[in-house]
Image (cartoon, rainbow, N blue to C red):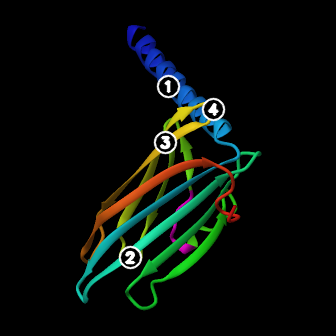
Amino acid sequence: MHTIFRTFALSFVAVVAFSASCLAGDTLSNALQGYSIVVSYSEIVNTRHGSFHQTLTVKLYVSSKGRIFTKHSMVSDRPGRTRSRDFISGEESDSAGVGRYTWSASGLSRHWINGRGRSITETIAIQGSGGNFSCQMSLSRGGGGGGGAAVTGSSCRVFKGNAVAGR
């Protein structure tokens, strides 16, 4: 009986913690409606054929209905790597390999596997309330083949308005 109670108590705590996390994510997504988040980072990518520089800029806009619109832009000094893509949260295909943003208690994150089989997770931590927000992006890479990459600079900002529409 004691073991059953302990298992139930741990399960209840896990459900409460998960519910609180979802509520915090919902609260954050509600607070950020009408706001944009712009993240940019530059990196040096090392491959067996040499190194190249690239800069990725991600513009996210949280609509009044809580949908996340994104625009990914990549500029690279390697031929064929410069590109731009637009997505709507929940509607975008993951076949492009860019991952979908999901809300957490502390911000947004996405996970994808790049063309070299490397697992990548981008996390955007967002702090603040009442229209005064700040953010910080972190990137983690794991596994996969071929070379690696080193982030050489990054920035993150939150502001009122639609950065995806260019306003």
**Sequence-wise first label, 4 or 1:** 1
Taking the spot 38% from the left edge, 13% from the top edge, the residue there is 3
Taking the spot 60% from the left edge, 57% from the top edge, the residue there is 60
Residue with the mark numbered 3: 134
The disc label shown at residue 17, or none: 1
Q: Is residue 104 left or right of residue 153?
A: right
Looking at the rendered structure, the secondary structure element under dot 2 is: strand
**Sequence-wise first label, 2 or 3:** 2
Q: Is residue 159 left or right of residue 120?
A: right
What's the residue type where badge 2 is placed? Gln
Which is the main secondary structure of the residues drawn in magenta?
Answer: loop
User: Where 119 falls versus 4 (above or below)?
Assistant: below
User: Residue 86: horizontal and vertical position, in percent?
Assistant: 64, 70
- Specify start and end residues of the magenta stretch as a single range: 96-100
User: Residue 16: horizontal and vertical position, in percent?
Assistant: 53, 22
Determine whether label 2 and label 1 are within 8 Å by CB: no
What's the residue type where badge 3 is placed? Ser
**Sequence-wise first label, 2 or 1:** 1
Residue with the mark numbered 2: 54
Q: Nearer the viewer, mark 1 or mark 3?
A: 3
> Disc 2 versus disc 1: distance between alpha carbons?
39 Å
**Sequence-wise first label, 1 or 3:** 1
